[in-house]
Amino acid sequence: MTIDQYLFALFALLTCGGAISVVICQNVVRMAFSLIISLASISALFFLLSADFVGATQLMVYVGGTIVLLIFGVMLTSSSALLQIRTSPAEGFLAAGIGVLFLSVFSFTVWSVDWDRNEAKLAGVTAVDVPPQDYNEASSGNTVRPLAMSFVGLRPDKAGKAPGYLLPFEIVSVHLLVVLIGAAYLARTKRRVSAES
Amino acid sequence: MSLILAAESLAEIINSYAECDASSVAIAAVIHVALIGAFFGLPAGIFIWAERKVSARIQDRLGPTRVGGRFGWLQAVADGAKLVQKEDLCPKDADKPLFRIAPYVVVIASFAAFMFLPFTDGWSAVSLDVGMFLLFAMLSLEVIGVILAGYASGSKWALFGGMREAAQMVSYEIPMSICALIPIVMAGTLNLNEVIHYQSADWIGVIPPFLHWNVFHPVAGPAFIVYFVCATASCKRAPFDLAEAESELVAGFLTEYSGMRWSFFFLAEYASMFLVSAVAAILFLGGWDDGFGIVRALKGNSTNVLDPGVIAGNLLGAGVLMLKASKLVLIQIWVRWTLPRLRIDQVMTTCLKYLLPMSCALFLAAVVYPMALVLGTGRPQILPLSNDVSAEAEMSTSSEVEVERAAADGEVT
């Protein structure tokens, strides 16, 4: 096994362990911490796969942004009902069913890949020397520039024929804004009600 | 670039002396970690001493005078020795695992961000095309440790400190990131080393090279001030130290901590002070560029990293960057002992009503300014590049290269 594989095993274990402890824990803040471990390990997996940009975005958006908002929201609305979550058996049953369905979809996807053909395809590719600095070649993992260009609607790699991702990008950002405003609104009203009562 | 190959170029050098591929990567990685550890710990120790000395002088005292000779040089070591011996307390009401783990989260986040700092031209542990982005992502993780510490302590003071910290960090991160984006947009890259290359230049006639630093740019100059204010706030430094606020909240999120865990928080605070100052120096003050073309002259056109000239130039560059970052840290210390603490509503007002609109306006100006200059003068900047003819030629060739590269990418895909 190479160092890469050891690290992959480590971070994959951390990802799964974090995810499992999110389900098992009943305290919201501990859940959030397990989620941090899980999501940060996923970003480490992205780095191992040379997807720097996606890994950094994972850290920035999920770990740095969403989780902080989550913990912050819990602290803001810290009533004992929110801090301890107890699920009823029916809920557990339902969640387990959905989880098993998801697992079957994922495992179907994983097993439907023809790995041997992929290996054969990759056999001709030799390791690319990564320059220690400066822009890397696109083949060695530098996807930043094409990605950024396609986010603003330009596709130089497809000679301008394919559409960029400007519209989905905008829709996602507006959606996120709506979610944030909604969360702030919910936190606010709850607080006001408790102040009156 | 895979993370474990972060030490790639060093591994190649080791490999050229001893033929062992796997272990040379490991050795290079260990060297990198040790070096970053030194750059993480040593400045923190020195700045803790400096903080005592500077605060003492500002308050008309002498500060530490005995430990390690006349100036109290070894005060930080003595502090460390004292803290190691202290009992590691954990309150009864605390959420114990989270309480124990919170200091490590803070230290690791701060330490990990050091990986992406280019200490001098090409000397960084991990040189990524998204280095700046990843550095800010790592820095934003620090707040998680503080919030956890505040929550897990099981104390009202700590909870208040953690909440204030969360509100402050979440809001100050926005203008800070927008201001950091301005040099990024100007240089057109997220690679920190490339941002410095963009600012370093040779003498052109009588124009000294330091005029190319972003801080002398009419838009990026004000952005530097806004960035520095936000960076001070993001390190929880006075006048923004509401998370600790010893006169109101005992010690905020630090209230229940003692011994080594407490000192981890402090180590991380001073290290991230140094880190944001180094980032400010890189983005706005030319990083390792000394401003008079000495580093560039020493390095010449040599590409061999073991060339004496290159090594001398790199060492000088590292010293220049350290000096710039230390100056900025000293300013932070000076501000801390001069200005009174803001109230929490004033902190939020400063950020959301003043700094955020300012940073947005500056960002817009940074995008529009080169266009306006091109319309007015035909060139995207006021200062001449090496000289106009060759500069334009260079620009056109680089854009041709860009087009060719894009075409090649298209063929590949």
Image: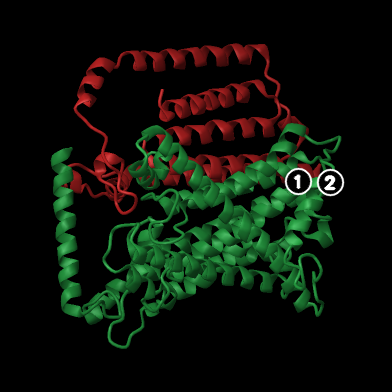
Chain painted red = A
Q: In what element is the residue under mark 1?
A: helix
The location of residue B313, given as percent across then percent down, is 39, 67
| Residue A38 appears in view | yes
Q: Is residue A163 left or right of residue A70?
A: left
The location of residue B363, given as percent across then percent down, is 42, 66
Q: Residue at x 43, y 48 (%)?
A: B126
Disc 2 crowd, CA 10 A, few/some/many (<14, 14-19, 20+): few
Tell me the amino acid under the disc marked 2.
Lys
Q: Colour of chain B?
A: green
| Residue B341 appears in view | no
Q: Which residue is mark 2?
A: B86
Q: Which residue is mark 1?
A: B260
Q: Quadrant of residue A117?
A: top left
Tell me the amino acid under the disc marked 1.
Met
Q: Are marks 2 and 1 in contact (CB under 8 Å)?
A: yes
Q: Residue at x 80, y 76 (%)?
A: B62
Residue A196 lies, with reference to residue B69, above or below; the image says above
The location of residue B261, given as percent across then percent down, is 74, 45
- Front residue of B39/A100: it is B39
Q: Quadrant of residue B376?
A: bottom left
